[in-house]
Amino acid sequence: MRKELQTNLQYVDVLNEWDPFRLTSGGYDTEIADTIQAIHELDDCDELARKIQSIYEFSFEKVIPLEDCVKIAKELLIIKANDSCSI
């Protein structure tokens, strides 16, 4: 359980740093929670990227370019892969 919490905190750090709408004050708590849920459900980078795009579009009514979402999805899936490989 502790390892999963640590991994989730890594996701939070990466997503807070991402700041796609330049809010600087955070303000992505709901989107980050929804994105972490999606990471646990999806292993495909393109699927995860589209899901992230739709989560943020739903909240902010602005579309993040898919290539930006793919970049962040890759980063998140690397964390996920590292977590599942560690003992």
Image (cartoon, rainbow, N blue to C red):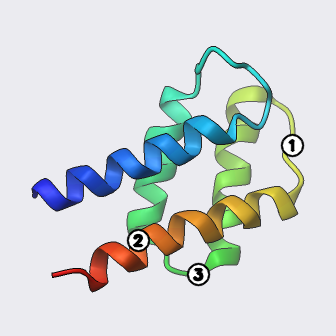
Question: Alpha-carbon distance for marks 2 and 1?
Answer: 25 Å
Observer-nearest of 73 and 56 = 73
Q: Secondary structure at mark 2?
A: helix
Q: Earlier in the sequence, mark 1 or mark 3?
A: 3
Q: Does label 3 or label 2 sit earlier along the sequence?
A: 3
Q: Quadrant of the N terminus?
A: bottom left
Report whether 35 appears left or right of 9: right
Q: Is residue 10 left or right of residue 53?
A: left
Q: Which mark is residue 44?
A: 3
Amino acid of disc 2: Lys
| Of the pair 8 and 54, the residue shown nearer to us | 8
Q: Amino acid at mark 3?
A: Asp
Judging depth in this view, the residue of 32 and 75 nearest the camera is 75
65 over 34 or under it: above or below: below
Q: Nearer the viewer, mark 2 or mark 1?
A: 2
Which dot, 3 or 2, sits closer to the camera?
Answer: 2
- Quarter of the rendering containing residue 57: top right
Few, some or many residues within 10 Å of mark 1 (<14, 14–19, 20+)? some
* Residue holding disc 1: 63
Within 10 Å of disc 3 (Cα), the crowding (few <14, some 14-19, many 20+) is few
Residue at 50% x, 79% y is 43
* Element carrying mark 3: loop
Residue type at numbered disc 1 = Val
- The residue drawn where x is 75% and y is 58% is 69
Density class for disc 2 (Cα within 10 Å; few <14, some 14-19, many ≥20) is: some
Q: Provide the residue designation for mark 2.
A: 80
Give the answer, above or below, for where 47 lies relative to 85. above
Q: Residue 46 in the image: x percent, y percent?
A: 70, 76
